[in-house]
Amino acid sequence: MNILIFGPNGSGKGTQGDLLKEKFGLDHIESGAIFRKNISGNTELGKKAKKYIESGELVPDNVTIPMVLDVLKHASKNGWLLDGFPRNIEQAKQLWEDLLTDGEKINYVIELQLTRDIAKDRIMGRRLCVNNPNHPNNIFIDAIKPKGDFCRVCDGALSARADDLDEDAIDKRHNIYYDEETGTLAAAYFFKNLAEEGNFRYISLNADADIHQIKETLLKDIV
């Protein structure tokens, strides 16, 4: 089973992705982790990516796309859940073309929908567990409030990412995500328009719903 998941920062995408990973034994492939692995491993693509990251620039598609496609080709036989890629319409088109070339298919595309204002509040309240950053902890959401400075799931120590508290940084990330012309939403809609032709399901969910309700809906819709 292969799944693409879309959602703005703050939508609970990591939490729901972790759920699907555990339920179906999938490789949870996150674009950020791919960058870190290539950079720490000093690969040729990692060296190129590092130069752009250190200069504060976005890593170009001709570096990002080969990294992601290589990981997909070596994923678990159970399949993969791809999170954080594609980020723009060109990456979406290239991903689809390469999947077709390799005889791979997509089974589900999930879009977690959330307004910018709510997403921003959620990001600023997000706290990351040292044991598992996908454990849901948010000081502004009653249902998943942490135990003070400790994870509500495993009692691990919590911290906040510096860029999660930087409103300008959040706005910059969201400008890319909510762009329906060339950004991440454009990539999501590219797959939405392909769903019937590509023989996969496109599932849209309200990410402002209770986290457990979203979980139940996902497990019901994905078989």
Image (tube, rainbow, N blue to C red):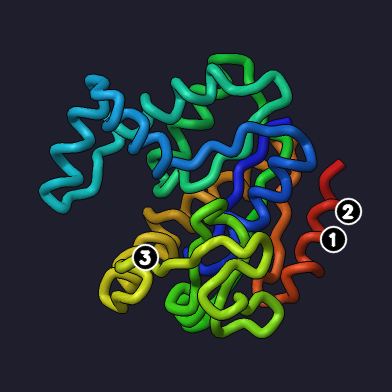
Residue 176 versus residue 85 in the image, above or below: below
What residue sits right under mark 2 in the picture? 220
Instruction: Please name which of the two marks, 3 or 1, marks the residue nearer to the observer.
Output: 3
Q: Which residue is mark 1?
A: 216
Is residue 180 visible to us here?
yes
Give the left or right position of residue 211, taking residue 58 as reference.
right
**How much space separates mark 2 and mark 3, taking CA atoms?**
33 Å
In the image, 134 versus 12, the foreground residue is 134
Which of pointers 2 and 3 indicates the residue nearer the eye? 3
Residue at position x 58%, y 56% in the image: 134
Q: Is residue 198 visible?
A: no
Q: Secondary structure at mark 1?
A: helix
- Circle 2 Cα neighbour tier, 10 Å, few/some/many (<14 / 14–19 / ≥20): few
Q: Position of residue 151 (x, y in %)?
A: 59, 67
Query: Nearer the N terminus, badge 2 or badge 3?
Result: 3
- Where is the N terminus found, in terms of image quarters? top right
Contact between marks 1 and 2 (CB within 8 A): the answer is yes
Residue 159 picture location, percent across and down: 43, 67
On screen, residue 52 versus residue 26, left or right, reads left
User: For residue 155, which quarter of the picture?
Assistant: bottom right
Spot occupied by residue 201 in the image (x, y as percentages of width and height): 75, 44
Q: Is residue 195 left or right of residue 61?
A: right
Mark 2 is on which residue type?
Answer: Lys
> Earlier along the polypeptide chain: callout 3 or callout 1?
3
Q: Which residue is mark 3?
A: 161
Label 3 residue SS: loop
Amino acid beneath label 1: Glu
